[in-house]
Amino acid sequence: MTYCVGIQLDRGIVFMSDTRTNSGVDNISTFRKMHSFEVPGDRSITLMTAGNLATTQALISLLQERSKHPSDRSPDILQCESMFQVARLVGGTLKEVISNHADEGQRADATFNATIILGGQVKGGAPRLFMIYPEGNFIEAGEDTPFFQIGETKYGRPIIIRAYERQMSFEEAMKLLLVSFDSTIKANLSVALPLDWHIYEADSLANGRMGRVDRDDPYFETISNGWGVALREAFGNLPPFVLPA
Amino acid sequence: MTYCVGIQLDRGIVFMSDTRTNSGVDNISTFRKMHSFEVPGDRSITLMTAGNLATTQALISLLQERSKHPSDRSPDILQCESMFQVARLVGGTLKEVISNHADEGQRADATFNATIILGGQVKGGAPRLFMIYPEGNFIEAGEDTPFFQIGETKYGRPIIIRAYERQMSFEEAMKLLLVSFDSTIKANLSVALPLDWHIYEADSLANGRMGRVDRDDPYFETISNGWGVALREAFGNLPPFVLPA
């Protein structure tokens, strides 16, 4: 499994992804699931991937290779004129990778599926956030649903629904995502530290700040322990249920 | 979908179930998923069901009919000598119902599946809590895992993991379950009020207190609104993330 969240704020977009991949519970590894493309002053594009690792790695490699040979007729993620065109390109490439694998042997093509969160900004447009399906089509975040989750989405969703605000600072958004990841990590073995994060600042047209929360990160430990205590306190402060006589 | 929780305390067992059934999102109904069997002074047994409604209704009807004809050779839920024997009986009956349906036509037998939470006490034994699988086998709650959830279990799980204590009062346990159900109801359309609840008091050997939390229940509204506020406060009190320079 996997857990990735992309969250749109007035100030920009915050991305966070875990790094655990597993094939069964006895074959786990650490792989980066967040990848960025940048042309400073022109665009910053970030992808997070969930699903079959062979598919998602092939997708990223294809996007990278094609961006290095702009003379090809293939469209290029570093040259698309808008985030919408980037989403079409990524969706089309994803569909191509999945159908290539499915053609060549095993028929259980669900095994090759992957889902993508794509966000960023291309000069001349606003920051935009998309979720791309294995079929290559996609949806865009809006006023009513300003964030996307992929992978193991359920455990970490209630706190995002309750605490998200579009006006949040990047610091608050990072805290919110870390709480959401902590709840997920506590409940599902196949989601694990380290966590990659990326803060895209609106209109900066550059990757900006990125980092990794490692296994022994003291802030994450503070959040993880503090959230347990805070939840129990919050729970204790709710009025008691009164049993009927 | 469905959401049911059975939670074992030092004081007894608390059961809670929602009442929504759906076949697609455009065909929803309200059905009771909690059923109790009682012989005062001898036993109190409670079942909660998730899965195919035809299967679970047939299961309950069979258990009821057979308990009314104790002269039959079929074993009787009101006469089994222990909770373990009750679990075997319910598991066997469940397996029988599912295989009957599967024999008679449609082969996608997953459609007929159901999962059961069974709890209660038979004179001479302790209160016990089981989860029964469609295959008829079952597991029992213990010191390390003192509660079972069936149906849409993920959204409501983190708060139970964080706030559960074996020494809780019934009032606290009811509050905990209502918070857990509220998080689930907010996230999944196929889980909905009203909620049925049942508090079995250890060694009472009688059903005891039962009730229903209806759509306009003022306490549930207080919990639902109060929990959102409390969560946001708890979140606000966590130390802020500090962005690297």
Image (cartoon, coloured by chain):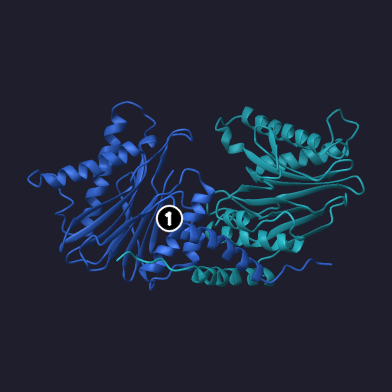
Chain colours: A cyan, B blue
Residue positioned 84% across, 53% down in the render: A207
**Residue density around tag 1, few if under 14, some if 14–19, many if 20 or more, within 10 Å:** few
> Type of residue at label 1?
Asp
* Residue at disc 1, secondary structure: loop
Residue A17 on image: x %, y %: 68, 54
Residue A29 on image: x %, y %: 63, 55
Q: Is residue A218 left or right of residue B62?
A: right
Quadrant of the image occupied by residue B99: top left
Closer to the camera in the image, A19 or B192: B192
Quarter of the picture containing the N terminus of chain B is: top left
Q: Residue furthest top?
A: B105
Q: Is residue A11 left or right of residue B232?
A: right
Residue positioned 57% across, 53% down in the render: A27
Quarter of the picture containing the C terminus of chain B is: bottom right
The reply to whether residue A27 is in sight is: yes
Chain to which the residue tagged by mark 1 belongs: B
B244 versus B192 height, above or below: below
Q: Is residue B167 left or right of residue B25?
A: left
Q: Which residue is mark 1?
A: B217
Closer to the camera in the image, A67 or B210: B210
Quadrant of the image occupied by residue A163: bottom right
Residue positioned 7% across, 45% down in the render: B71
The reply to whether residue B157 is in sight is: no
Residue A60 on image: x %, y %: 75, 42
B119 versus B191 height, above or below: below
